[in-house]
């Protein structure tokens, strides 16, 4: 099997109910961290890792995502006429080449495993990446690139992994570690959202995967698991149990759970503070707000 990974699946069919009412009319993936939509962070990470084909698994009401990646002739014409070349450049960096982007409908919310399975005909028989846009990861070397490099070394299936606190394991897929060699662990199984006292470890899956096509075959006949949904975790765990190689990679970088309000706010702050044009003003504002709690901003 060829060892480069050029296709990525982005499951973006979720309703985003934790962000209602915002997500009543705006797809969650279009919500911004400072001025870039969540989906753009995921796309940029994928591009930097060498991904060339982008497969979005969408649902009703996600049309704004398709428009976002399309060229916008009217806007481009306007910016060109006004000589706003910097904005034009930003805009053009979001365009996706025709034929390199595909949108597939998940017509029923049957779970992450089902969403990935919906992309099976576009994946066929090569290893592919899955990126969950809720998990924003800032890193010197993009997380997906770290994973693809690991895949080129060891093959198999690879999931991004991070240690979490005992009380948090029930929010994640959790790894049953067979062999821990530091940066990588080899896995004997995985459990989706276990109770803390039943979790096989504290090493949780974060939303980046490199998967072999056999996982798609397993998804085909998989029974619903946790939350009565078809779980990607269960298909990968089955692969482990049938002797396929599965590894967890303790990636370098900082992960923000943008599926929660706290994580989303942290990511917003962190990204704003990393931007030279915003940093000083924001720092002053935060320091002042912390000194005088409750005082509203006048200017
Ligand atoms: C999904 C996966 C879970 C993984 C998590 C990472 O859960 O099912 O295994 O640990 O993403 O963010 P979700 O957060 O969609 O419930």
Image (cartoon, rainbow, N blue to C red):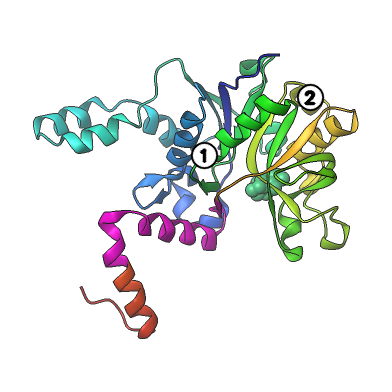
Residue at the extreme front of the image, as rendered: 181
- Which residues are the magenta region? 254-282
Is 224 included in the stretch rendered in magenta? no
Q: Is residue 244 above or below residue 272?
A: above
Residue at horizontal 52 percent and vertical 61 percent from the top: 261
Residue at left 48%, top 50%? 23
Q: Tell me whether the residue at label 2 lies in contact with that at label 1, contact meaning CB atoms closer than 8 angstroms.
A: no
Label 1 sits on residue = 142
Image point (57%, 46%), residue name: 15
- The quarter of the picture where residue 195 lies is bottom right
Q: Nearer the viewer, residue 111 or 198?
A: 198
Say whether residue 79 is left or right of residue 130.
left
Is residue 149 something that shows in the picture?
yes
Kind of element beneath mark 1? loop
Q: Which residue is mark 2?
A: 220
Lower sequence index among marks 2 and 1: 1
The percent position of residue 245, horizontal first and vertical second, equals 81, 29
* 62, 160: nearer the viewer: 160
In the rendered image, the vertical position of residue 234 relative to residue 139, given as above or below: above
Query: Measuring 25% from the left and 32% from the top, which residue is drawn there?
Result: 89
* Quadrant where the image shows the N terminus: top right
Q: Is residue 209 above or below residue 172?
A: above
**Callout 1: 10 Å neighbours few (<14), some, many (20+)?**
some
Q: Secondary structure of the magenta portion, mostly?
A: helix
- Residue 125 in the image: state x and y as whole percent: 69, 14
Q: Is residue 278 magenta?
A: yes
Between 115 and 38, the one lying in front of the other is 38
Reply above or below: 259 against 228. Answer: below
């Amino acid at each position: 099997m060829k060892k480069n990974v050029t296709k990525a699946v982005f499951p973006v069919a979720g309703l985003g109910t934790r962000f209602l009412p915002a997500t009543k009319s705006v797809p969650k993936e279009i919500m911004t961290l400072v001025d870039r939509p969540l989906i753009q962070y995921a796309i940029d990470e994928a591009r930097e890792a060498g991904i060339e084909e982008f497969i979005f698994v969408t649902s009703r009401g996600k049309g704004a995502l398709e428009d976002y990646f399309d060229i916008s002739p009217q806007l481009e014409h306007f910016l060109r006429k006004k000589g706003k070349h910097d904005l034009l450049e930003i805009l053009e960096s979001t365009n996706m080449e025709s034929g390199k982007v595909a949108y597939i409908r998940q017509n029923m919310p049957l779970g992450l495993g089902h969403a990935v399975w919906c992309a099976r005909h576009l994946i066929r028989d090569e290893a592919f990446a899955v990126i969950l846009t809720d998990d924003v990861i800032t890193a010197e070397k993009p997380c997906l690139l770290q994973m693809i490099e690991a895949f080129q070394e060891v093959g198999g299936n690879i999931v991004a992994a991070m240690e979490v606190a005992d009380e948090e394991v029930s929010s994640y897929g959790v790894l049953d570690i067979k062999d821990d060699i530091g940066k990588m662990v080899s896995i004997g199984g995985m459990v989706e959202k276990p109770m803390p006292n039943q979790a096989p470890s504290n090493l949780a899956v974060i939303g980046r995967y490199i998967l072999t096509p056999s996982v798609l075959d397993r998804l085909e006949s998989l029974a619903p698991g946790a939350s009565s949904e078809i779980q990607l975790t269960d298909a990968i765990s089955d692969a482990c149990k049938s002797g396929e190689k599965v590894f967890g990679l303790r990636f370098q970088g900082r992960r923000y759970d943008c599926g929660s309000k706290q994580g989303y706010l942290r990511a917003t702050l962190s990204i704003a503070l990393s931007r030279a044009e915003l940093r000083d003003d924001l720092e002053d504002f935060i320091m002042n707000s912390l000194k005088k709690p409750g005082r509203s901003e006048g200017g």
